[in-house]
Amino acid sequence: MTLTADLVIATAVAYVGLLFLVAYLGDRATRDRPGGFLRSPFVYTLSISVYCTSWTFYGAVGSAARSGLEFATIYLGPTLVFVGWWFILRRLVRISHDQRITSIADLLSSRFGKSSRLAVLVTVLAVIAIAPYIALQLKAVTSSIEAIAGSSIFGRGSLEGWGEVGMALGVAAGMALFTILFGTRNVDAKEQHHGVVAAIALEAIVKLTALVAVGMFVLYSGGGLDAIFTRAEEAGLDIHASETFGDRWVATLLLAAAAIICLPRQFQVTVVENSDESHLRTASWAFPGYMLLMSLFIIPIALYGLTTMPAGSNPDMFTLTLPLAAGQDGLALFAFIGGFSSATSMIILESIALSIMVSNHIVVPVMLRLTAGDGIGEGQSVRRLILNARRLSIILILFLGFGYFYLTRGSDALAPIGLISFTGVAQFLPAILAALFWRDASTRAAIAAISVGFLVWLWSSFMPSFASSSPMVAQIMAEGPFGIAWMRPQALFGLIGLEPLAHAVFWSLFLNTSVLVVGSLVTNQSALEHVQAALFLNVFSKSASETNPLRGSAEADDLFLIARRVLGHERAVTIFSEEAKQARMAWTSLEPSSAFIHRLERELAGSIGAASAHVMLSKVVTGSAISLEEVMQMADETQQAIEYSQELERTSSQLRATAEKLEVANQQLRRVDQQKDEFLSQVSHEVRTPMTAIRAFSEILLSEDDLDANARQRFMATIHKESLRLTSLLDEILDLSALERGERSWENRPVNAEESVDQALQVCDALARHSQTVVQTSQRAGRSIVLADSDRLSQVLINLISNAIKYNGATSPEIDVRSRVDGTNYIVEVADNGVGIPAQERDRIFDKFYRGRLGEAFAGAGLGLPISREIVTRMNGNLELVSDGANGACFRITLPMLVQKRRGRTSIAVPGV
Amino acid sequence: MAIDILIAEDEPSILEALSFVLQRAGWTISAVMDGDAVMDAVRSKRPRMLVLDVMMPKRSGFEVLKQIRAEDATRTLPVLVLTAKGQNQDRRIAEELGANSFITKPYANTDVADAVRALIGAPVAPEER
Amino acid sequence: MTRRKIIAAALVFAIFGVLAVFPPLVVLFRYDFRVFGVPVENLYIFALWTLLVIGARLFSQILPHDEPTRVKRGDDAP
């Protein structure tokens, strides 16, 4: 088998077809069975290894051939970041999940007050910074095809006549097509691409196996490590890292550590595509392990290549050319596919990540602004718009990469190109770290810092790479712009002696960080920044309170203040009133239940988003780090509400509480006042009625001289009767009022209740006989000692008996007075055979001035029963109406009996009275 | 035979005094002692006016007055309202319901007689006194 | 070990890794000597790397497990 360009291209296309199939199956598998194999931590880890591009596959060998161990920094930096995953990556992943972050631009914009300017800036800069990186892949793929094409006379095949540039263009176009087919088939709100991730994972395995296979081949051919190193040393190569651990070592370590966080595609796979935070746990050791395996054979391959390949061979292509030179065509083809794998996976993911940023932060906002919202509403057209935007961005990104490749085609090493990109994206690192750890970092400072860092990068790192193709750039590099020496790109401010990469890294990151720090110190945050900063910083305290639903002590007042701030006064009042009504409490004494807090949280979420609402409430409820005042301030500013001073807030809440109490007291007063009015009105009526009769008759007596003696006599009797009624009315009013106020006190002493019954019967005897009423005593209890006042008890009984006589109304009126002992109670009942008390009056007969108007005019003021009940109550007893009204009325007095204890002490039998 | 005045009053002694005074002044009277009886008496005895107490058993004077003003046959019947509560609110209600005159107990006998006279004029001189 | 101590240990381990690959520590191993035919710097770097992987694996098991129990993304749309 002879390897030709046609063959490898056909293999590559077939390989892409395989990837496409994997992606398709992957998408389907995840859709059918979420959480299956494709969501395992190892697939996640393998997808992160998209970090290892053709830069690793080819470039690392070249780098090792040129500067020995230095290539390892590119993998040691990420290793350290993953070893310290708990402190940075975990935070990043959690925040991004909570905030639904879709890209690195989204992350920075979200933290810095949802600044769209920052998002656009980051997106544009990322696209520019990644162009060299894409170019690197194009160059690697082109070179690898060239290497195979040049390996035999028939190698070029149908590529005859294609130059390097044309081939690169073809590769770029092919890659654009693959990426569009892979990455823009659908728009997923979560920006997760399970199928693509599956394909990337497969590619990770392919490239690792290929590199290890080449490594084993080299070890075998070279006769083992010892032999390879010895031969290299004999060939005059520096196998010891004499110059390695210098400024460049530090700079590349730093850049690589930054890149694993800042590269758009790394952010995409590590953070956005992460479906389970625990996967990070596995990746923390598995990904460094993967990189270790990838790096293991780099130095042997490089040294073996340097010692065995003819001088002038491109060391970047050793991985491919060594097997080719040994006639191992199968291995060479496998190596080609490995390199192709690393290039395609990088290009696909990088352009997906960038296209998401471009479409989300530039295209869609612009379209929305242009169309002012109309026509964008339908889901389908938005979808199509976004997809087209992404396709265009992919083409743009690859075209930029190709453009860079074209302009810098003179230089041949892969690794330096990649480091230019790394330095560019590293400019995001200070802002990202500030987002994660520094509350006071401000948006304006972040924008300024990234811009400054980027300008320095453009000047001292990006632009110099055109030196080989542009004489003007070469001149600026040599003499500075317009001859200004201190502005020479690789000797800024006169800093000479640093290696160019370290120089660019130092100045760009130093100025970037300085601007960020100083800028944040001198600028103020907007309200939204304040809120978002708190969200980012407290991402873990938030989740802690989320696993346990909000519990703890929250003052209703505090919650109300927040609710009012966010929802407005009326809505807040409504919510709290409802709750207060349900709990049957006043607001001020309301103890918010967790259900209520939950409800409140949902209400707030409707206005300020779930995350903010939760954080705000959890601050109040659990009282963690942020003080209530800070949260209040956040809320204030968020809602652009009036800034109340602390003092005002406290005072107003006190005022509100006081006003509520006053309102309650006022209502009571009004009720009492109304009762008093009714009472006075009743008294007035009761007094005026006898007065009317008295006045009318006395006027008659005064004015009429010719009255006969009989009439005169009758009128005077009426006057007398009415004045007596008036007197007894006043007595009763005073008596009742004194009883009610507790002024009229008597001492309850042990008395024989039966004696009071006898006394009452005796008093009522005359009245009974006068109205021909039969008073009988069907049952008597016999001597029963109760704690009472015997006169008062008699008064009550007399009242009951005389009522029974007066309001009887039966043709042959009968009254039964009976007493008995029931358990520890003494019971006396006064029953009559009269018309009874109508059902509708039964509830009211104990009301003051209420009279069932059935009896004679000779009635009390309607105070007898209220007074009687009051008296019995003060004897710890009970007066009630027990009959149903069909067979006359029956009033029952129940009094607790006194139990004579053996020791002679007395006590009341009914406890608790 | 129509009468001059129908008195609706539940207090026997006040009723007696009123009857005496009004009869003495020369009017013919009839009396009822609860609210339910008023309408029947108005229809059957066709009085020229009504003296109406507010606080009466079964139906209050105000309810009675409302019905009197609601029925065509009695809409124009002059009504003198008596009340022992003596509050402005009662006077207002009485006026709203269409009482022609309002007197608070206790009253001077002459006030009642004057009010009646103002409503139905001096008593028709009886053929026989 | 308590949660705090484990986290502190993880931090110290990560910082150790950083210090170990940066000068001046790394320069300690820069001398012309070969172990099993391999230059000592190479051996140091790869041994350290292996150690970091093993350590990371250890810490990945003992660091507190307080990830959200469910896959949150997308399920908790407000």
Image (cartoon, coloured by chain):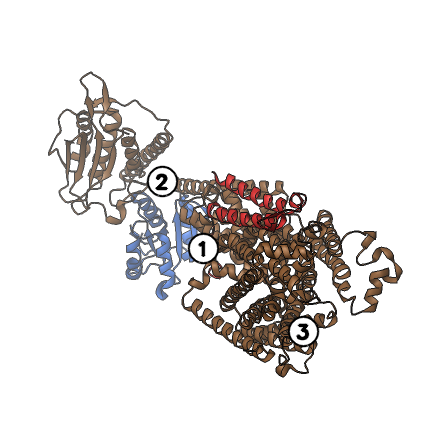
Chain colours: A brown, B blue, C red
**Dot 1: within a 10 Å radius of its alpha carbon, few (fewer than 14), some, or many (20 or more) residues?**
some
Tell me which amino acid carries mark 2. Answer: Glu
Q: Find residue A882 and report its horizontal and vertical position in percent.
A: 20, 41
Mark 3 lies on a secondary structure that is helix
Tell me the distance, in whole angstroms, between the alpha carbons under discs 2 and 1: 23 Å
* In this picture, residue A192 sits left or right of residue B46: right
* In this picture, residue A569 sits left or right of residue A515: left
Q: Residue at x 69, y 49 (%)?
A: A245
Tell me which amino acid carries mark 1. Answer: Glu
Q: Mark 1–mark 3 contact, CB under 8 Å?
A: no
> Looking at the image, is mark 3 or mark 2 nearer the viewer?
3
Question: A51 or A151: nearer the eye?
Answer: A151
Q: Which residue is mark 1?
A: B95
Quarter placement of the N terminus of chain A: bottom right
> Farthest residue in the left direction?
A778
Q: Are marks 2 and 1 on the same chain?
A: no
Question: A831 or A913: nearer the eye?
Answer: A913
Q: Which residue is mark 2?
A: A686
Q: Which chain is indicated by disc 2?
A: A
Looking at the image, is A750 positioned above or below residue A888? above
Q: Which residue is mark 3?
A: A399
